[in-house]
Amino acid sequence: MKSTGLLLREFFEVSASAAAGEPIHKVRIYSAHDNNVYAFAAISKAIPRQGIPPYAALFALELRRVVETGRYVVMPIYVKSPGEQVQYLEIQGCGGPLCDLKNFYAITSPYLLGVDEWKERCNYDENATFDSQIYD
């Protein structure tokens, strides 16, 4: 789950920009392996836990604005397989399917990771080389 804190940080930054009325891309899509999808759902505190997702599963955090109040909320969604029903999950500690953005920040902020910390924890080496001979 080391690198997933980077993705969560990006969600924080983009959602804060959206809530401030700044122009943003409305959709961000990432492709990942099952363990990365699971890790992102886990640090997002989405419940009930779905376990290791099958191939082509989808986990997303949706940022929504409540029209009546103008407040921003986070809603986690999960689709086990293409064509299946969307499952609306909850954020543990929020008490419902819509989690106030500030509450979401408070609940999940311990898992944030900066680029420098990620590089240190994951032993990132900018000079690393890849031997492609085994694939030729």
Image: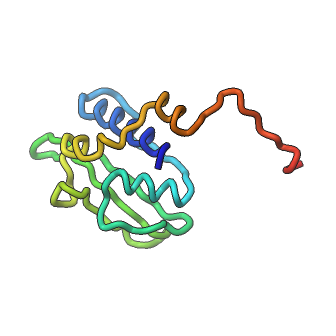
Specify the quadrant of the image occupied by residue 18: top left
Q: Which residue: 28% across, 54% down?
A: 75
Specify the quadrant of the image occupied by residue 17: top left
Relative to 60, say whether 72 is above or below. above
Give x and y (percent) for residue 130: 77, 39
Give x and y (percent) for residue 78: 39, 63
Task: Pick the residue in front: 46 or 58.
Answer: 46
Looking at this rendering, what residue extends furthest in the bottom direction? 84
Give x and y (percent) for residue 76: 32, 56
Left or right, residue 68 beside residue 19: left
Task: Pick the residue in front: 109 or 70.
Answer: 109
Relative to 123, say whether 59 is above or below. below
Left or right, residue 131 beside residue 76: right
Relative to 35, say whether 2 is above or below. above
Q: Which residue: 48% across, 45% down?
A: 2
Give x and y (percent) for residue 56: 54, 64
Relative to 101, say whether 89 is above or below. below
